[in-house]
Image (spheres, rainbow, N blue to C red):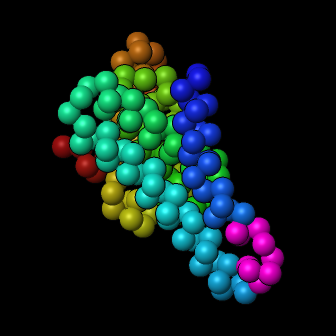
Amino acid sequence: MKERLECVVSGRVQGVMFRDFTKRKELMGDVAFAKAVARFMEGATFKNVDAVRTAAVASKDKAEKTRLGLEAALRFEAFIKEFATSDFAPVALWNAQQIYAVEDQIDLAIATADQLLKQYAKEIAGGDNLKNKLEETTIRDLAAYHEKVANYPKAAETFVRFADKYKDLIM
């Protein structure tokens, strides 16, 4: 828990000066400029977190890979809290879910998969998220997570949901 708190705090400290800038009305008076700055802030924050994920994937040291991976997952969750309506939010939550699964934090993988399917149902069913199959893989993975923790009724229910929704893909 202490590591989780430190991760969230350190992630917030990096953007304090930038966020203070955005609160100054005299600097943010132009609507187009304010929107561009907000979009830049979202993208820069997402990229910063994704850099931690990339470092985890690249690490050869198992302990470092785990530490960085879980730090990235927590930062992705913090990103979602700050930028819940961002275009990057569904991908951030999907990334957190995948990291938790890899790190065998199945309870957290289930929670983030459920959140993704509920909070971003519309967003993951279209556009690039559809092309990237976020909804499809999340439902399938969620069923497998439930199976892994021996919640067989929920696993079966989720597998049936997947089969019903993607019956044309199943041969």
**For residue 130, what is the image quadrant?**
bottom left
Residue 154's x, y, as percent? 47, 22
Residue at screen point 44% across, 45% down: 94
Residue at screen point 66% across, 61% down: 17
**For residue 137, what is the image quadrant?**
top left
Residue at screen point 37% across, 22% down: 104
In the picture as drawn, the residue positioned furthest to the front comes out as: 17
Residue 78 appears left or right of 165 = right
Residue 7 appears left or right of 16 = left
Tell me which secondary structure the magenta stretch mostly adopts: loop
Residue 118's x, y, as percent? 58, 44
Residue 125 visible somewhere in the drawing: no
Is 112 part of what is drawn in magenta? no
In the picture as drawn, the residue positioned furthest to the right comes out as: 25
| Magenta-drawn segment | 21-29
The total of numbered circles placed on residues is: 0
